[in-house]
Amino acid sequence: MFRNTLFTKLLFLLIIGSTLLISGTYYLAIPLIDQRIYEIEERAGKSALDNFYVLLQQTKQDLAAFETYSLNSHKEKLKDIVNIASTCLDRIQTTHNQGNLTLEEARAEAITQIRSFKYSHNDYLYISDYNGNLIYHPDPNLNETNISELKDINGKLIILPMITKAKVCADVFYDYWWNRLGEKKPSHKLTYAKDLPRWEWVLFSGVHLDDIHNEVDVRKEKLIHLLRDHVRTSKIATEGYLYVFDGNLNMVIHPNSNIEGTNFSALKNPASGESVGKELIEVAHSGNKSLKYKWDKPSDPGHYIYDKVSWVRYLPEYDYYIASSVYLEDLQSSGKYLANRLFQLSFVTILLLTGCGLALIYNVVKAVKTLAAAANRIVSGDLSSKVIIDRHDEIGQLGHSFNQMVDNLKDQINNLEEGVKERTASLSLMVDQLEQHNVETSMLKEANEMLQECRNEKEVFQAVHLIMKKAFPGKHGSLFSLVYEGKRLEIVADWNGSECNITRMYDHDACFAMRRGSSYVLENIETQLPCPHVASPAEAYICTPITAYGETFGILHLQHGVKDNEQSAKILDLVENIAENIANTMANLRLRSRLQHQSIRDPLTGLFNRRYMDEALRQEESRASRNDTNVAIIMMDVDHFKRFNDNYGHEAGDEILQNLGKLLHNHFRESDITCRYGGEEFIVILPDLSLEQSVEKAELLRLAVQDEVYIYRFGEKIGITISLGVALFPTHEPDVYSVLKRADEALYRAKERGRNRVVCANAE
């Protein structure tokens, strides 16, 4: 075996490599690893300190945020309590106004209600009039006294500033110093005051800020407890740890519960003889940030012979010093341990590799000889594989023999493989085309069914989002709706893009598909103009108009990025089919909406018709009876309207009625119902208005019609006047249709008295 050239070369190379690897590992890798592990452990100690420092800072921010939250929460609570009480007092005032209570009974009932309000830590409500006379206060020394000159311990007036501000602003917060109920020691207090103009009173309630500070202190203790658990579970290297002390050298947090809470100012640094706590404080305020000193170990107490290092940072918000402490021996132990284990592992590995290498070399050489003999037989006709080797040993001979064999079979194998590939590709293309056709047919059917189920345009937009996302996964696109009477394009759906695109608007001609009236396909961004709504296209896209029955509803936009013309044409056909389904759905929805609008609206004025008025009267009668409220009815008629038509024509009459309809629509509240009763007669239904308010509303309408409703004919300004009758349910009649009749009778009395006037149903 040693006479073999290949075996000798490989064995010599293996011996040299093993020697170099052992030497390099011992003299180069192990010292470097030892140093790097030490640096990593040192950085870990500093990182633990920095992380804990950040945690403490965050607790301060958390406490500040919690204090603000607690203060705002108490303010909202004060507002809610005072508003509830003021609502109660308003109800009592309403009962008095209705004559069910005398003024003295109302005041007594109000004081009884306020006296019953008690909450939190013996907090209460009290009342004062505008002159500082206490109407009610739970303190018997203050109740029914004048405290307008009363001041807190800082000489600050208490009651008058709150009354003044509450009368101006309706409600106000005011702080001062005052003692709790039943206590003598004053504390900082925040009071909320609300003006009650119907009583000429001011209602007060407050909270002592000590309650908020106590809540903050409780939260601080919880946070410190969490940090204490964190310190006790944190380890630096093997025996290192974190601890926290304050400026007076009191140990705030320490993993040893026996040390925590003690003062260590008496502990000395054995090397310097100075207080180790003071040296740690000096380090925290210096640029060094670390202190090395001699210390004992828990396993060897009292022998201060072990080198130790501490890194210290100062947190001024708490006057805390955070320290990360570890023994130098502990920092070095991991590196030394790893280096020794690595050297041992390397040595054992090299021995194993050497043994395996010898066995491998022996097997390779033996196999090469065997394969060389077999390769000579393959040349004579025994087929195998091909290798590329340019060597002068046994492996080179093997490669030469295999190359001769492969050259003889190359042409036959290539021809056979090409034929199989072509046939496979043809069959695969046919299958893909059939599958794609089935998928598109199924998808269009599902899309049409989903769109047919939509009952409004919003559902259509959501359906299009789902359809396009499923039909073109990973492709970005948008649905544009034509709005503002066809002047603007608005994005109403966006898939695989950004949600912030929704509601973005463009001019109606910002798409070439809108200008053409047909699909626009951008295939080459270097030779074709992009649509203005696509600022800088990154890939090919399609824009298809959504049109049905001569009406355009918007644009369907898809960025597909396909460059193949045949595939691009298929995508265009699919997008146009989807757009056609969308257009048919939109056309049906808008037709349905127009028919519904025409069924309840007067076509000339746009006001509700008589059919809708009958339904509204029944609903308002039921609601008013249930809630014990009023419903006013104003019936009006255009004065001398027949004469107006005879003089200026029916076209002018229609125009003046349209102008009157616009004024009626704008003049009343959204809750009021304006209807065209027939011809030149109109009715307005006004829920929750008194008779006086309804008459005032009618008079304002009469003046507005007289000044604002007119047309121009033959260079002449022609206006109209109206007569109005007002009646109130249930004041005038117990059912609403009888009230409608009373309003009609009042209208005729207005005409008999000269027209252009308002007459109430109960006026004789």
Image (cartoon, rainbow, N blue to C red):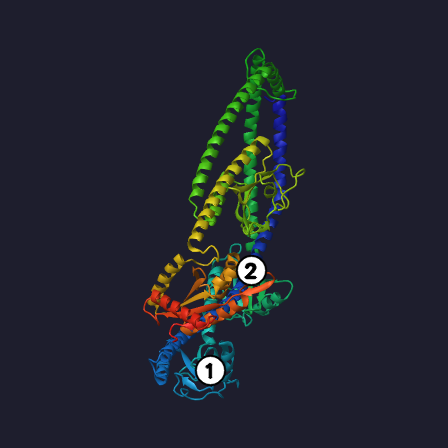
Q: Amino acid at mark 2?
A: Leu
Label 2 and label 1: CA atoms lie apart by 45 Å
User: Could you tell me residue 750's position as x and y percent?
Assistant: 43, 71
Q: Is the residue marked by circle 1 packed among few (<14), some (14-19), or many (20+) residues within 10 Å? A: some
Q: Amino acid at mark 1?
A: Trp
Describe the element under mark 1 as helix, strand or loop. Answer: strand
- Give the number of the mark in front: 2 or 1: 1
- Residue 178 is marked as 1
User: Could you tell me residue 384's position as x and y percent?
Assistant: 55, 17
Q: Report the quarter where the C terminus lies.
A: bottom left
Residue linked to disc 2: 49
Q: Is residue 15 above or below residue 235?
A: above
Describe the element under mark 2 as helix, strand or loop. Answer: helix
- Looking at this view, is 583 or 303 the one in front? 583
- Looking at this view, is 681 or 99 the one in front? 681
- Looking at this view, is 17 or 446 the one in front? 446
